[in-house]
Image (tube, rainbow, N blue to C red):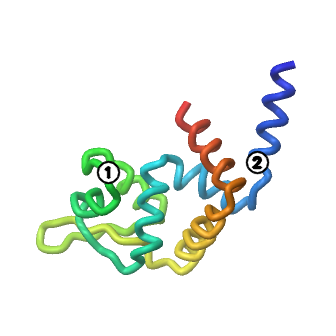
Amino acid sequence: MVANGDDFTARLMNDMDPQLLDFVKTKINSFIKWDLVRFFYENPNTADTVENIAKYAGRNAAAVKPELEDMVENGVMEKREVQGTFIYSLANNEDMRELVNRFILACEDRHFRVKAVYHIIRGMR
């Protein structure tokens, strides 16, 4: 009987916009990434170092760096070298910025946030 409960929960939690569900499962699949996306949504023109981004996001730079790198690989962020220092910024891709905007606006809904948290936690297993 537990399997049926798990199936019901999975169906309920998968009841999201398919693009946003994929975004959560594949690109924003950690709470650090969620914090970073929120930070860059609120500061869309920011381009800064790992250390400064971590400080502004209230996170440890050692924890933020691999998450930023993963987000660069997934097209959410961009990375460039300026005078020997790597600078990160939100992707300049219009479609990605729109997806980020949709995600953050969807997060205003408590039910959406619960579903997003569920998928992040499941992905951590």
Q: Where is residue 8 in the image (x, y as percent from the top left)?
A: 84, 36
- Amino acid type, mark 1: Arg
Q: In whole angstroms, how far apart are the C-alphas of marks 2 and 1?
A: 29 Å
Instruction: Answer with the quarter of the image where residue 85 lies.
Output: bottom left
Q: Position of residue 71 (x, y in %)?
A: 43, 58
**Viewer-proximal residue among 75 and 118:** 118
- Report the residue that reaches farthest toward the left: 83
Residue 19 versus residue 117 in the image, above or below? below
The residue wearing badge 2 is 14
Which residue shows up at 63% across the image and 64% down it? 108
Q: Where is residue 47 in the image (x, y as percent from the top left)?
A: 30, 74
Q: Which of marks 2 and 1 is nearer the N terminus?
A: 2
Left of 42 or right of it: where is 24? right
Left of 42 or right of it: where is 47? left
Which residue shows up at 22% across the image and 58% down it? 51
| Image quadrant where one finds the C terminus | top right
Disc marking residue 69: none
What SS does tag 2 mark? Answer: loop
The residue wearing badge 1 is 59
Q: Residues within 10 Å of mark 1 (few under 14, many from 20)?
A: some
- Amino acid type, mark 2: Asn
Which residue shows up at 57% across the image and 73% down it? 101
What SS does tag 1 mark? Answer: loop
Which residue shows up at 37% across the image and 80% down it? 45
Instruction: Answer with the quarter of the image where residue 33 lies.
Output: bottom left
Left of 87 or right of it: where is 68? right
